[in-house]
Structure formats: structure tokens, C-alpha cells
Amino acid sequence: MTKINSKEQYDSVMARIEELLPLVDEKTPTTDRNCIELELLSNLAADYEDEAFPIKKPSLQEILKLRLAEFGISQKEAAQKIGISTARMCDIINGKREPTLVTARKIATSFNIDSDIVLGII
């Protein structure tokens, strides 16, 4: 098998991985057949997961909402922190408006968000 093509194959591979896990640990030689099989099946499963269950890149809106929740602050408090109106912050969080470069810099530094995400590069 060079590729997992269905959910049924994936489930079978995952079941076999579960059987192999107790048989292999960090002390198991890499030449051990169980270790080799576990590595091969794990790689097949990972490739299938990457294709079947892709993780999308986060948007500024998603990250900003998360950060506000983590900091325990409201949109109004966030707006005050970076020096913009509450309405503008609401528009940015709801994706109705892009931040200016100055505002983007303040968002990135104030809320520890990667500048690539703030600028929409990622």
C-alpha cells in the first residue's frame, strides 16, 4: 500500500497502529520489524490525515477573538488599548474592515499576534 484511499483503510491502519504501540518504545531498535511497520503505517496515516482533514490557516478575526478571550478583555477595552474607536475594532473583528498599517502594528504588538497573520500574508 503506497497510499490510504478510504476511511475504511485509514481505520484499519489506525487499528494496527494501536496494536503496535505497546510493542515499540524508544529502546526498540530501528531494525525491529514492529518498529519499521509502525513507522511506515504512521507515515501513511499522517499523509491521509493531511489530505482528508486539512487544517486551514487562521484568519486575523479568529486570532483576535481568541486573544481577547485569553486576555479577558472586551472589544471596547481592546480598542482603547490600541487607540482606535470601538466601532472600528468591531469592524476589524467581524472582517468588515482591514486594519491600517499603524493599527496592524499595534494589534500585533499589543496582542502578541504574528505580523504575517495581521497583514494577511499567511
Image (spheres, rainbow, N blue to C red):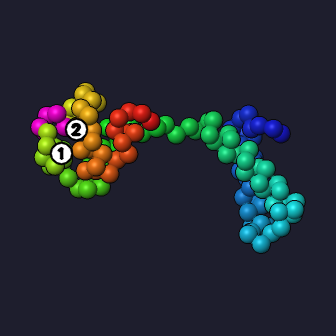
Report the front residue among 48 and 114: 114
- Going from the N terminus, do you reach mark 1 or mark 2 first? 1
Q: CA distance from mark 1 to mark 2?
A: 7 Å
Residue under the image location 73 percent in, 63 percent down: 21
User: Residue 72 occupies which quadrant of the picture?
Assistant: bottom left
Residue 116: x %, y % from top left = 40, 39
Residue carrying label 2 = 103
Left or right for 32, reference 93 = right
Front-lying residue, 6 or 71: 71
Q: Which residues are magenta?
A: 85-89
* Tag 2: amino acid: Thr
Q: Residue furthest bottom?
A: 27
Residue 65 visible in the picture: no
Q: Amino acid at mark 1?
A: Ile
Q: Is residue 9 left or right of residue 32?
A: left
Q: Position of residue 94 (x, y in %)?
A: 26, 33
Residues tagged 1 and 2 counted as in contact (Cβ below 8 A)? yes
Mark 1: give few (<14), some (14-19) or many (20+) Cα within 10 Å.
some
Secondary structure predominantly adopted by residues drawn in magenta: helix
